[in-house]
Amino acid sequence: MSLKTIKENSREIHKAEKDAPRTVELLTESEKLMPELRTLAYCTNKALEHGYKENFKATKDGLQSLETSRSYQPDQIHVMNFYRFEGITDPADMSVLYVIQTDDGAKGTLVDAYGTYADEDVAKVMRQVEDIAKRNTTSDNKQYKSSNS
């Protein structure tokens, strides 16, 4: 992956962090303060608890559910939130967890390396997805719950 692609991916993620329409938050405010709970495994389990049970993989044209083999184009994909992680022993060991919902209601996750080892297919798909949200505040979470009740 080229340095240009890495910079583009980083810009897309930072842009998404600023523009936070509707999202789902997996962690409570107290969990966010506990670094040992901010792991990929912990957040993946929280996603499962919230009904995000499908695993997605990136293809040349979009995402595919590993459970149903159904394919989704970028305009059918909504990233409800995403979380970045650094390795405990190696800060270069970075990954990102995308919490995804599709137009037909499929809910699941996609995990990718972040930075140098990022999958180019994932980067391509995420650049084309228009609905990427990053929730940062408790008030956003309350708004999400009330609008989806």
Image (spheres, grey):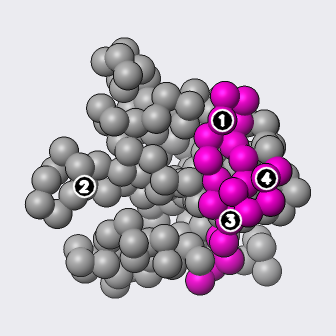
In the picture, measured across the screen, residue 96 lies left or right of residue 88, that is right
How many numbered discs? 4
Give the mark, 1 or 4, whose residue is nearer the N terminus: 1
In the picture, measured across the screen, residue 132 lies left or right of residue 64, that is left
Determine which of the numbered discs, if any, sits on residue 59 in the image: 1
Instruction: Quickly name the residue at label 4.
Output: 69
The relative height of residue 70 versus residue 142 in the rendered view (above or below) is above
Q: Position of residue 44 (x, y in %)?
A: 48, 71
Please name whichever residue, 72 or 28, is drawn nearer the observer in this view of the structure.
Answer: 72
Query: How much space separates mark 3 and mark 4, taking CA atoms?
Result: 10 Å
At label 3, counting other C-alpha atoms closer than 10 Å, the crowd grade (few under 14, some 14-19, many 20 or more) is some
Q: Are marks 2 and 1 in contact (CB under 8 Å)?
A: no
Quadrant in which the C terminus appears: bottom right
What residue do we see at 36% from left, 42% from top? Answer: 114
Query: How much space separates mark 1 and mark 3, taking CA atoms?
Result: 16 Å
Instruction: Quickly name the residue at label 3.
Output: 54
